[in-house]
Image (spheres, helix red, strand yellow):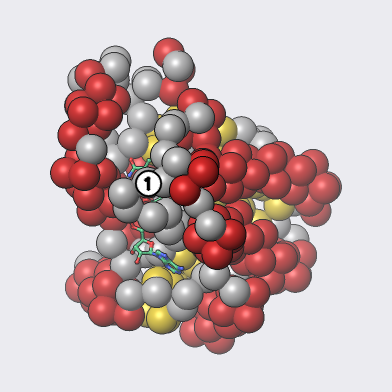
Amino acid sequence: MSRLEGRVALVTGAGRGIGRGVALALAQEGAAVAVADIDADGASETAALLEAQGARARATQADVGTRANCEAAVAAAVEAFGDLDILVNNAAWTPTPGLSLLEFDDATFGRVLETNLWATFWCMQAAHPHFIRRGKGSIINFASGSGTRGTESQGAYAAAKEGIRGLSRVASREWGPDGIRVNIVCPFANSPGMIAWSKGDPASFEAAVAQIPLRRIGDCHEDVGRVVAFLASDDAAYVTGQTMWVDGGSGSVR
Ligand SMILES: NC(=O)c1ccc[n+]([C@@H]2O[C@H](COP(=O)([O-])OP(=O)(O)OC[C@H]3O[C@@H](n4cnc5c(N)ncnc54)[C@H](O)[C@@H]3O)[C@@H](O)[C@H]2O)c1
């Protein structure tokens, strides 16, 4: 199946983990993929992986924590492939180990907001003119059960991720008349970020895994990437403003 043949996608934070899985899934559906990550080597590895499968890919080193860098990442995707149809705001940063609300200083709290909420906003604004020109577009933003649950030691991250869900719902209404769909994915998958969490706080990790109805940890590509490919495709043409829990059912029982 090639549901995304002829489409161009930008995936932020695609140098590893879920972002890499998403990039792979979009490429397997025929999309040309711009791979942006603060980690230049990771971005290059992902692009090489896609190209080895016959896909068109371009790696860009980008720290999405500033407006200028987000605009540059969108511009690089358009320059590489001529246009833009799909934007996946997947990049994220939060301090490890986490901090209680009283431990956060402004700079750290701000950096979490910049690399999650602000980055999503900046990339969406930068992509918007290209979607208008195409007459349609699909945005998939990443949020988290840490936000809906209010996980301890994740104050900035929870605030940023719930901000992303609010921003996405507003965009789905403001931009829907222009054919631009905006959806949210809340995943649970075996990325390096998750592995770091499992090592840093095994008790909370085991507790989270124990409540997954499907009794397994998701795969970045097979489980999360394919759902993003569906949301990006015309199969989801009548779906916008929705939060998709791709977490084995954990969110649905929260
Ligand atoms: N893995 C999960 O189960 C899980 C659960 C809930 C939410 N999420 C969300 O899913 C998304 C992917 O998570 P993951 O687990 O694959 O994360 P990860 O930490 O494994 O990978 C994140 C990627 O983003 C990149 N990145 C970090 N800061 C960046 C910046 N400033 N600019 C550009 N790139 C940057 C990293 O280099 C890395 O390649 C994130 O938005 C995360 O919050 C993941």
Kindly identify the amino acid type of the residue bearing the numbered disc 1: Gly
To which quarter of the image does residue 91 belong? bottom left
**Rendered residue at 71%/65% (across/down):** 125
Identify the secondary structure beneath mark 1: loop
**Along the horizontal axis of the image, is 79 left or right of 207?**
right
Q: How many marks?
A: 1
To which quarter of the image does residue 227 belong? top left
Q: Who is closer to the viewer here, 29 or 115?
A: 115
Crowd band around label 1 with a 10 angstrom C-alpha radius: few (<14), some (14–19), many (20+): some
What residue does disc 1 label? 98
Can you give x and y, in whole percent of width and height, for residue 103 in the image? 47, 48
Can you give x and y, in whole percent of width and height, for residue 225 in the image? 36, 47
Instruction: Look at the image and tell me whether residue 185 can be seen.
Output: no
Can you give x and y, in whole percent of width and height, for residue 192 in the image? 23, 53
Looking at this view, name the residue that lies furthest to the front. Answer: 102
Where 89 sits versus 197, above or below?
Answer: below
**Rendered residue at 59%/42% (across/down):** 159
